[in-house]
Image: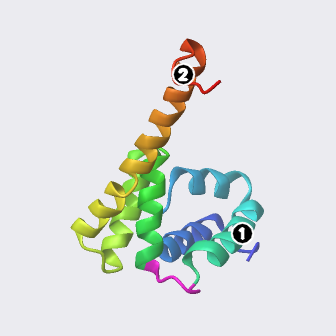
Amino acid sequence: MADETKEEMLKRVSENRGYSLEMHRIMAEVDIDWVTSYNQFIDATYTGQRLLDRKTKELLQVAVEAALKADVDQIQAHIRVAITEGASPMEVLEAMQCVIMPMGALAYRRGLQAWSAETGIGLEK
């Protein structure tokens, strides 16, 4: 695969994933061997068929990337693929709603721990 041209590699990335990102274009320009290795990893962990279907994997991608505050265009790319793979817009929304509680609760818990440690309120002695 290292014999692929930059254009061939980017076409394959886009066909395999359903999108390409700026990262793919930059890395294809400067280190096509890295992109080849990265694509093998992506196929083994994400786009290749194993137990989870592509729709489920995309819903997971949307939820995780939204929770991690990925770039909007990156999240949109996964939303687009999820819908192409059969997810309804409401299923995608529900996937994002699933992360509200744990992400918000984790942030609140961390803040509460800091508050309690600083004020001494609520700490068991």
- Give the overall secondary structure of the magenta segment: loop
Q: Up-down: is 53 above or below 6?
A: below
Mark 2 or mark 1: name the one nearer the start of the chain.
Answer: 1
For residue 72, the mark is: none
Q: Nearer the viewer, residue 21 or 104?
A: 104
Q: Up-down: is 101 above or below 13?
A: above
Q: How far apart are the alpha carbons under marks 2 and 1?
A: 49 Å
Q: Nearer the viewer, residue 67 or 38?
A: 67
Measured from the top left, where is residue 87 in percent x and y? 30, 75
**Residue at 41% across / 60% down in the picture?**
62
**Tag 2–tag 1 contact (CB < 8 Å):** no
Indicate yes or no whether the magenta region holds residue 6.
Answer: no
Residue 79: quarter of image: bottom left
Q: Nearer the viewer, residue 33 or 4?
A: 33
What kind of element bears circle 1? helix
Q: How is the image coloured?
A: rainbow
Indicate yes or no whether the magenta region holds residue 53.
Answer: yes
Whether residue 18 appears in this view of the structure is: no
Which quarter of the rendering shows the C terminus? Answer: top right
Q: Residue flagged by tag 2: what amino acid is it?
A: Ser
Residue 2: quarter of image: bottom right
Q: Is residue 19 left or right of residue 90?
A: right
Local crowd at mark 2 within 10 Å, few (<14), some, or many (≥20)? few
Magenta stretch? 49-54
Mark 2 lies on residue: 116
Mark 1 lies on residue: 36
Measured from the top left, where is residue 56 in percent x and y? 43, 75
